[in-house]
Image (tube, grey):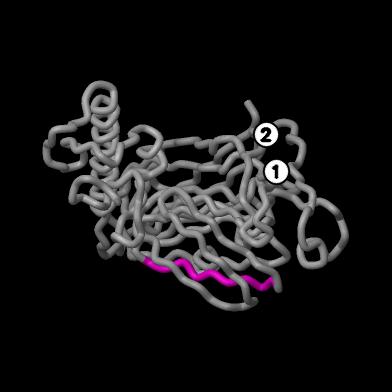
């Protein structure tokens, strides 16, 4: 039996034969519903065995948390959808750099523990986790720079190279992606081994790539940050994707440079976002091919810096960020 009430989608003990679905993990750990109990829980009607006391309090708390989260998500999405495409005939340009100050932290490397003939053709034994790339002139690559409070401007024109993902030598290329909301992320693997892209955050997918050069695509319907990891045992593989609502986003190059064109005159907040370069520890992950538990690196939290910038008619503005461990 799935559930004593008719709302099968809220069952704690799913039965696929009855079309039941699994509760989120958080709910399953909060509420344990005996199969003989009826209660006014998730829309079930009252019955003689209604859940009381601690179970009801926990269920109510979960419902309140779920409702608050849904309302917050709807509010965020509505705010993002407020962006309007307009003609920008007199727009200005914002350009600048993100540069490193101070001593560089130790580069994060990870041992190649699987498929070395594919993942480590040069036999280096270790690969870079690519969390901090600083060029010869102290420019910081792979920083996302964006305008925070822009509500109208030009149409989406993000470069194609940050909207397509390849898996090559057990690395995600590019390491940082920008994908317009409601558009597809195109993915493929150049490697002759099983990769499984696991996404969490603003998008949630688990996509196997058993064959080389087979293109797979998924629509990104919610703005926000998406973490990408490999569930095929290549635990060092990591990338970050920002699903964006407007075109005023850029990923810094190896010199730390960025540029926005066609910016309507006005004053804006400009943000530099970096994924973070610290290692917080390790966590257990599941290798779907070998069916074994493996250790995957856990990274420190992203970092942001924010400034104000004024854009004049047909003018040029410069914003430079200096980041570091301090």
Q: Which mark is residue 204?
A: none
Distance Cα–Cα, label 2 vs label 1: 8 Å
Chief secondary structure of the magenta portion: strand
- Secondary element type, mark 1: loop
Segment tinted magenta in the rendering: 183-191
Q: Which image quadrant for residue 249?
A: bottom left
Q: Position of residue 321 (x, y in %)?
A: 55, 39
Residue shown at 61% from the left, 39% from the top: 299
Contact? badges 2 and 1 (CB < 8 Å): yes
Q: Nearer the viewer, residue 261 or 14?
A: 14
Q: Position of residue 314 (x, y in %)?
A: 37, 57
Q: Which mark is residue 138?
A: 1
Q: Label 2 belongs to which residue?
A: 101
Q: Nearer the viewer, residue 17 or 144?
A: 17
Q: Quadrant of the C terminus?
A: top right
- Secondary element type, mark 2: loop
- N-terminal of the two: label 2 or label 1? 2
Q: Which image quadrant for residue 81?
A: bottom left
Q: Residue furthest top?
A: 53
């Amino acid at each position: 039996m799935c559930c004593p009430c008719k709302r099968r989608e809220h069952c704690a003990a799913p039965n696929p034969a009855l079309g039941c679905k699994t509760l989120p993990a958080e709910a399953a750990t909060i509420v344990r519903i005996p199969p003989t109990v009826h209660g006014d829980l998730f829309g079930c009607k009252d019955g003689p065995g209604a859940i009381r006391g601690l179970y009801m309090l926990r269920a109510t708390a979960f419902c309140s948390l779920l409702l608050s989260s849904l309302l917050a998500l709807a509010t965020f999405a509505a705010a993002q959808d407020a962006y309007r495409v307009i003609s920008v005939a007199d727009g200005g340009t914002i350009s600048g750099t993100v540069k490193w100050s101070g001593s560089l932290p130790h580069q994060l490397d990870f041992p190649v523990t699987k498929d070395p003939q594919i993942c480590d053709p040069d036999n280096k034994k270790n690969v870079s986790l690519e969390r901090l790339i600083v060029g010869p002139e102290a420019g910081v690559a792979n920083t996302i720079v964006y305008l925070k409070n822009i509500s109208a401007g030009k149409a989406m024109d993000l470069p194609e190279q940050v909207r397509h993902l390849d898996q090559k030598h057990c690395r995600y290329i590019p390491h940082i992606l920008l994908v317009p909301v409601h558009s597809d992320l195109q993915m493929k693997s150049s490697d002759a081994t099983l990769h499984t892209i696991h996404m969490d955050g603003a998008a949630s997918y688990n996509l196997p790539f058993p064959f080389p050069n087979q293109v797979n695509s998924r629509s990104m319907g919610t703005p926000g940050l998406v973490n990408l990891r490999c569930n095929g045992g290549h635990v060092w593989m990591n990338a970050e994707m920002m699903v964006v609502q407007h075109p005023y986003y850029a990923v810094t190059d190896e010199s730390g440079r960025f540029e926005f064109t066609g910016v309507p005159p006005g004053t804006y907040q400009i943000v530099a976002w970096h994924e973070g370069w610290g290692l917080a520890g390790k966590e257990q992950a599941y290798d779907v091919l070998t069916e074994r538990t493996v250790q995957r690196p856990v990274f420190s939290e992203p970092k942001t810096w924010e400034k104000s910038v004024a854009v004049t008619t047909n003018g040029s503005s410069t914003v430079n960020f200096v980041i570091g461990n301090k």
